[in-house]
């Protein structure tokens, strides 16, 4: 199978090349760039030297000559390539936000500042969080070409951390609070002051507090998981590491019992309840190839998932037993971007979902 990658010179594009080079069903890779056409990819990414030595072509050429196209482009620029792919009858996996909102164009345009270019394309598009929408992806793939709105990195970690609790109706009134920290590759390859080494190497900084573009995507997904509206408080942080997203999630479980002391260590009852909810999470995800619910007493860390498509989740309760604390860890470049995109390709083509993604996480 010939695979096209548009935006191949960006970070997510380079990660797609790395993963697809090891995919047993992937044949030639057609790599596209709008600003480096005619150059060799290995001159831009020396890790590819002797392994992938393609000359970069135009995005139009990649769409015209591939059996499936990945697009790792900035938001708002790739819809014409998606249209061209669908017109040719091939599937298109989009890592930007352009297909993450289905027919909810008003929400998309409020946050991304432009309307859809071709709203009709949403008829064959689906939000590509496999754990939530696997059946719909298969259903669309059986009918013709599919456009995948590959989820954002923060939304992947946050949503998977909340899913069992929301789907099983454990969450009570009050907002879900997500504090998440991302590695610097989350900002892409384009240089910017906040990502300059002296600015970020020895500091941890929240940004876009209460106004990050992933807020509508996460709250929409949590709403679908819960079957009702879910209020979200989301604070992203820039963490001094290359890869990884760690999300610490607080979900209120119910009204506070009157007179409940807040300042005591967790009772036996609270510890037993924590173990019960952890079991519920483990059972919920038992058939998911890329979600690992960690043993009680351990905490998820980006160290456990580096360079892998896994999402590690640990489940905790606060000392009163009234707030569920879930920690989820992903690699933003893999489960948060390129790996999840390959997982979606595997689903579209009926391959084993783990193909090309079964490497062991790098411990350091
Ligand atoms: N980095 C992450 O952790 C992450 C996670 C999840 C999702 N994403 C999403 O994935 C997409 C790519 O992210 P990234 O981090 O790889 O960004 P990036 O490093 O900035 O790369 C984007 C690439 O898009 C190409 N491009 C830019 N403007 C273009 C245009 N007008 N037409 C065609 N191509 C254009 C550029 O390559 P050429 O100039 O060579 O064409 C550039 O290399 C974004 O939508 C991002 O939000 C990123």
Image: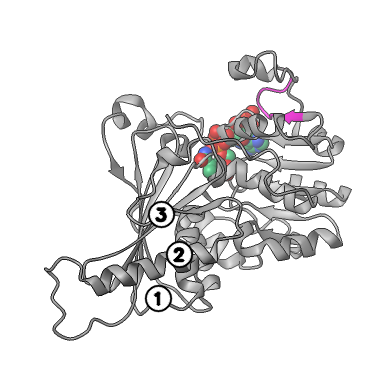
Q: Which numbered disc covers residue 171?
A: 1
Q: Provide residue 235's location: percent of width, then percent of height.
A: 34, 54
Mark 1 / mark 3, whichever is N-terminal: 1
SS label for mark 3: loop
Q: Secondary structure at mark 1?
A: loop
Position above or below: 250 against 198? below
Percent from the top left, x then y, of residue 62?
A: 79, 34
Q: Which mark is residue 295?
A: 3
Magenta span? 30-38
Placement of the C terminus among the 4 image quadrants: top left
250 sits to left or right of 131: left
Q: CA distance from mark 2 to mark 3?
A: 17 Å
Q: Earlier in the sequence, mark 2 or mark 3?
A: 2
Give residue 46's quadrant in the image: top right
Ligand 1 is found in the corner quadrant, namely top right
Figure disc tally: 3
Indicate whether residue 35 is drawn in magenta.
yes
Q: Are marks 2 and 1 in contact (CB under 8 Å)?
A: yes
């Amino acid at each position: 199978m010939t695979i096209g990658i548009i935006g191949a010179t960006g970070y997510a594009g380079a990660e797609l090349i790395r993963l697809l080079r090891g995919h047993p069903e992937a044949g030639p890779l057609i790599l596209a760039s709008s600003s480096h056409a005619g150059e060799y990819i290995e001159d831009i990414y020396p890790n590819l030297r002797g392994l992938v030595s393609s000359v970069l072509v135009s995005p139009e050429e990649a769409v015209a000559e591939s059996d499936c196209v990945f697009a790792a482009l900035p938001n708002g620029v790739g819809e014409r390539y998606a249209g061209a792919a669908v017109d040719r009858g091939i599937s298109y996996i989009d890592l930007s936000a352009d297909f993450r909102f289905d027919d909810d164009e008003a929400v998309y345009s409020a946050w991304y500042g432009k309307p859809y270019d071709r709203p009709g394309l949403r008829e064959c598009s689906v939000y590509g969080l496999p754990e939530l929408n696997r059946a719909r992806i298969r259903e669309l793939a059986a009918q013709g070409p599919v456009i995948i709105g590959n989820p954002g990195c923060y939304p992947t970690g946050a949503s998977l951390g909340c899913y069992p609790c929301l789907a099983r109706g454990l969450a009570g009134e009050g907002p879900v609070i997500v504090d998440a920290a991302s590695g610097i590759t989350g900002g892409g390859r384009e240089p910017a002051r906040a990502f300059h080494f002296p600015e970020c190497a020895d500091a941890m900084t929240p940004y876009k507090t209460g106004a990050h573009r992933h807020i509508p995507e996460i709250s929409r997904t949590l709403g679908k998981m819960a079957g009702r509206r879910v209020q979200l408080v989301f604070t992203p942080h820039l963490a001094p590491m290359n890869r990884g997203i760690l999300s610490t999630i607080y979900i209120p479980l119910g009204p506070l019992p009157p007179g409940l002391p807040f300042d005591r260590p967790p009772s036996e009852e609270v510890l037993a309840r924590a173990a019960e909810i952890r079991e519920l999470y483990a059972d919920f995800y038992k058939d998911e190839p890329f979600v690992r619910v960690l043993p009680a007493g351990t905490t998820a860390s980006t160290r456990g998932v580096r360079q892998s498509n896994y999402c590690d989740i640990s489940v905790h309760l606060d000392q009163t037993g009234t707030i569920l604390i879930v920690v989820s860890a992903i690699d933003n470049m893999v489960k948060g971007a390129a790996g999840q995109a390959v997982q979606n390709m595997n689903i579209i083509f009926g391959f084993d979902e783990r193909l090309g993604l079964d490497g062991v996480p790098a411990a350091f």
